[in-house]
Amino acid sequence: MNIVINVTLWIVYILSLYFSVFLFLIFIDKKNFFSTEESSINLAREPYVSVFVPAYNEEKTIVKTLQSIDNLDYPHEKIEVIVIDDGSKDRTRSIIEEHMKDKPNYRMISRPNKGKAASLNDALKAANGEFFACLDADSFVHRDTLRKMLALYEKENDERLAIITPAMKVHDPKTVLEKIQWLEYLVIILISRISSHLDSLYVAPGPFSLYRTEIIRKIGGFDETSITEDQEIAYRVQKENYRIKQCFDGYVFTTAPSKLKPFYRQRRRWYLGSIICLHQYKEMVANRKYGDFGMMQMIKNVAGYLLATAGIFIAVYLFIIPAWNYLKSGWLIRFEIMPILKNLDFSITMMDLLTIDFKRTFIIISLFMIGFYFFYQAHKNANEKVMKFGIIPLLPYFLFYYLLKGIILLMSLTKFTAKQKLRW
């Protein structure tokens, strides 16, 4: 068993170090550019833009979402807002109707519940915009974001640029779980920025990704069978050799789950949908035809799931089982800790130093240093302070948050293997 664990550990170490160092070197190479890059809000022309807002039982947030669209720094006559009530059972529809009064640029599509992708396709058929953005009904876009995204389209001047993604932050986090996700999202913004420069983005987040309408219609719209249509459309865009870029400071704010149960449901859907997408587009893995996306990002995505799965079993073997054995031993002695404390030996001998596995120690320290470096740079990249919410969210973030996500991932893999399906 120890041989299997050691071999698995070394595979995990080597793969983790390889991808970490790769991203680190790309970041170092682009660091000067990142530090001086600025988004413009000046446009040579102001194209007509459609904004889709799919909504299902969103009575608590829908008004704020629509108000954020109304507050965009963009001529209202150049924006049409198509709100799709996807069979809501609460007051969502009546709230939308009230908000639409005296707003000629608003339209509502009301339909039986068929899911988000179907709602987006209905809106896509009716849209008049040269570009369209999708804004989830629990998210809020910054007033400058649309201009920054359109300016990036102009700057790139590439008809094959199909999607520009936002920099997504957690809106007004209050609970510890929300603050932990706030930290996570900042790291994702930085990693996405790096991936954007490699043309390797593989997800177009629901909160305000901006699409070129003609291209999305050409490739068939959104996949209504997918539970993560934002990932599936990005994979398909990459497969068709179109491009996806990130607007690094085009901010949009999303409502994160505040409790474990909805968090579990959200991540289970994300992970299961991602696994399905990887399986659906498996021919792109290590395929030179798709450039860095095929040769790096797809391999990294596959390796990520393998590493997470291996990490769970290693954590159970190295930490959970020993901790359980200590608990059993403590129970046998009725948790009398004084005898244990008396026998503890904290001294370090020369022999202890000589028996240290320096190769493994070097790799682990390197991984931690790169991880902390990215964590710090992620806050700097997003103009946020590391200690904004104090130390309390930091401890669970580093100690067990990724273990929790790994467990959910493992459960998602089990569901995928059992061919169980989830609905959006």
Image: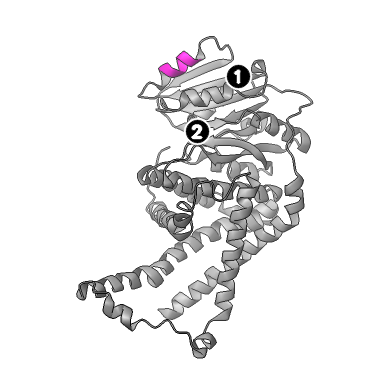
Query: x, y (%) of residue 320?
Result: 36, 68
Q: Which badge, 2 or 1, is on the more N-terminal residue?
A: 1
Q: Is residue 232 above or below residue 378?
A: above
Mark 2 closeness class: few <14, some 14–19, many ≥20 residues within 10 Å: many
Residue at mark 2: 117
> Marks 1 and 2: in contact by CB < 8 Å?
no
Query: x, y (%) of residue 403?
Result: 43, 59
- Magenta stretch: dominant secondary structure: helix
Element assignment for label 1: strand
* Magenta residues, start to end: 94-99
As drawn, the residue found furthest toward the bottom would be 351
Q: Is residue 156 above or below residue 342?
A: above
Which is more toward the observer, 331 or 421?
331
What amino acid is found at the position of numbered circle 1 in the picture? Glu
Which is more toward the observer, 20 or 230?
20
Residue 24 image label: none
Q: Is residue 48 above or below residue 383?
A: above
Name which quarter of the figure residue 322 lies in.
bottom left
Q: Quadrant of the C terminus?
A: top left
Q: Is residue 129 above or below residue 368?
A: above
- x 72%, y 58%: residue: 28
Name which quarter of the figure residue 404 lies in.
bottom left
Q: CA distance from mark 2 to mark 1?
A: 19 Å
- x 37%, y 46%: residue: 260
Q: Quadrant of the N terminus?
A: bottom left
Residue at mark 1: 80
